[in-house]
Image: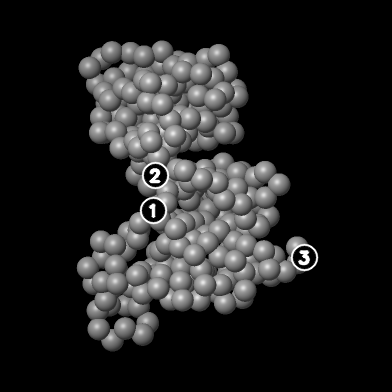
Amino acid sequence: MGNVIIIGTGPAGISAALYTARAGVETTVIGKGLGALEKAEKIENYYGFPEAVSGRELVERGMAQAKRLGAEILRDEVVGLGYDEKLTVKTTGKEYFADCVILATGSSRRAPNIRGLAEYEGKGVSYCAVCDGFLYRGKRAGVLGFAQYALAEARELASLIGGVTIFTNGESPKFDFEQGHTNPKLFEIVREPITELEGIERLTGLRFQSGARRPLDALFIAYDTASGTDLAKKLGVLLNVYGDIITDGDQATNVPGVYAAGDCTGTFRQIAVAVGQGALAARAMSEYIRNMK
């Protein structure tokens, strides 16, 4: 009956997995960790639990249930999403192909507070190396980030434009070069905090906390881990003015086969809502796959 890949192991993603697995759809869930609920000490407002339950316990129960029904759950970090005959999900070490993908990664990750970042979006600041890297061949490009997501974007750029600088903005690098199959000598790593992006009509450089400047034509943002909106942008999924993923009543986005559920859609951020949206997305995905055959 085809297959789906669910990105995110929180309530929205696991709820979707319960329904697709029971519908006979090959189901793979990929997530780096347990998400924001891992830090929730007590949850007292979720249906069916007369006593408070920790977020960790709730998520782990859901994952065990999904596994029992046949879903495969992988602990990995998703760093890319694309389309090549089928939807393609890239992790730090592998590529997976799917008929449908659901983004259930929670709310957007933190972004650095740097002057000019928003001003130069589309004018040298980009959020997708695969999409825009070819525009900067032969020019000076860098990646803003400090974790595996930044390394993955730097690798994409290096294949297009050669040397790439990774700016960690004062953060300690958390790269795993071996996992990324990358020679660390390919990249320059600059740790100094950035205070401002400079330019007139387009980005021309960075200013650091020390007052030093660095000429630059393009800066690709890959801060922390990839959020649902980061991945959505890579496929042209529409976002609202707040950066939330736009969906219809079935949790479908504007891109065929791509769905979203949970906090990344900007709705009332509660477990009950995420679980319900996951179920809606799963039903719609199962029907979408049936109609493909």
In this view, the residue in front, 107 or 240, is: 107
Nearer the observer, disc 1 or disc 2?
1
Q: In the rendered image, which residue does mark 1 sit on? A: 32
Q: Quadrant of residue 37?
A: bottom left
> Do labels 1 and 2 touch, CB within 8 Å?
yes
Q: Earlier in the sequence, mark 3 or mark 2?
A: 2
The label nearer to you, 3 versus 2, is: 3
Q: Residue 115: image x %, image y %? A: 35, 28
Looking at the image, is 225 positioned above or below residue 126?
Answer: below
Q: Secondary structure at mark 2?
A: loop
Q: Is residue 241 visible?
A: no
**Percent coordinates x, y for residue 45 in the rendering:** 32, 77
Identify the mark at residue 213; answer none if there is no mark: none
Q: Which residue is mark 3?
A: 293
Kindly identify the residue that appears in the image at 44 percent across and 34 percent down: 181
Where residue 287 sits in the image (x, y, percent)? 69, 70
Residue position for label 2: 225
**Kind of residue sitting beneath label 2:** Thr
Above or below: residue 155 compared with residue 97: above
